[in-house]
Amino acid sequence: MARQHDTSRNLSQKPQPRRSPTIADIARLAGVSPSTVSRSLAGNERIGKETRRRIADVARDLGYSVNRHARSLRMQRSGILLVLIPDIANLNYSDLLMQIDSIAHERGYDIRIGHTGVDAGRVDRQAEELFTGGIDGILLTSDYCPSSISQRLAAGEVLPVVRTLSPTAPDERIVGVQIDEEAAAFDAVSHLVKRDYRRIAHLAGSPGVLVSRLRMNGWRRALVEAGLQIPDKFIGEGFAVDDGRRAARSLMARTVYPDAVFCANDLSAYGLMAELQANGLKIPQDIAVAGFDDLSFSSLFSPPLTTVRLPRREMAEASVRYLVDLIDGKATPSPDYIPHQLIIRKSSGDRKMEYEKPGC
């Protein structure tokens, strides 16, 4: 007689599908309520730091992931922030963008990029999605603001729009997360004065841009307070490396050189230094140089560049926090300035030092 197999046992032993972890599971293991877990995973900073860390650890161990799409549908939000930048190739903006993306993700948002330097018309259309539900808020990083946004703000409408990195004019109704640009430039030039430099020229930023004017004001004020003469004109204008090279050629065409140059940003300082060195001038022995931004290459340049460090991480954190508060309808006070830092390196030297002469 043929032997029959007992299939009932095999069926009963068939592995069951693994159940996905839930908020209730996390709450039980973390020793908190489900509502606390939900608020913590949504990025609510009112939950204590240690509690948030414990909840995050349990969620990770269980393999739990937030269903952002479902949550967005419940809240009637897109879960997307639009970040407008003028030049993604510029290290200043690309570094800030990485910080914003990381922090926005922690708060439950994804980002979209609007490249104002490529197609402003397309960016304007993207910004209009704020009124159709396609995006929840807008982060500006330059003077540029889409007309559909600026007109509503001028009319007194409160919108989830925040500007960072670039300063906000006093008459604009935009929450600005920024450093004190004029004070930072003043500190950089005052440092050159303390190093005994007396003919301090300025490689200005782009004409008509607010940040250029504020940094120029800081340069002027430092010279005035030190009792030094203000040059009749800049050695050049612009924020690009090539602008720095042109400024260096203009400088070398003069009969009397400045003994130091304050550049409106690091990129123009790179160009200035490279062109001066290519023509046999030494930095800082012949001309000292200071910049503004502290880009990643500034410490690697030869000589390393003295510069104002922009606190990009802190600016990104504050700007995303203020933007999410505006999206949530919370009252948002005007932020204080984010502290800046002067990074002193070899490019500013010291006129009081005795440099080694050739042949000595």
Image (cartoon, grey):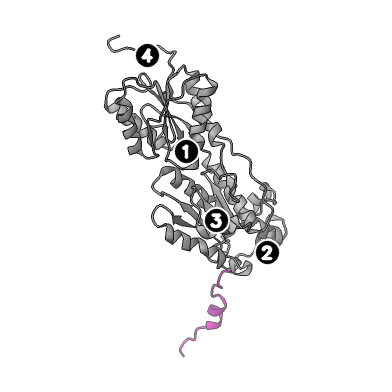
What label does residue 150 carry, if any? Answer: 3
Earlier-in-chain disc, 1 versus 2: 2
User: Range of the magenta residues?
Assistant: 1-19
Name which residue lies at 39% across and 11% down.
Answer: 354
Earlier-in-chain disc, 4 versus 2: 2
Q: Label 1's element?
A: helix
Image spot of residue 329 (x, y percent): 67, 58
Q: Label 2's element?
A: helix
Earlier-in-chain disc, 3 versus 1: 3
Magenta: main secondary structure = loop
User: Cα distance, mark 4 to mark 1?
Assistant: 33 Å
User: Which one is in front, 47 or 182?
Assistant: 182
Residue bearing the label numbered 2: 24
Residue bearing the label numbered 1: 212
Query: Dots 1 and 2: beta carbons under 8 Å?
Result: no
Q: Amino acid at mark 1?
A: Ser
Residue bearing the label numbered 4: 355
- How many circles with numbers are drawn on the protein? 4
Q: Amino acid at mark 2?
A: Ala
Mark 1 Cα shell of 10 Å, populated few (<14), some (14-19), many (≥20): many
User: Cα distance, mark 3 to mark 4?
Assistant: 54 Å
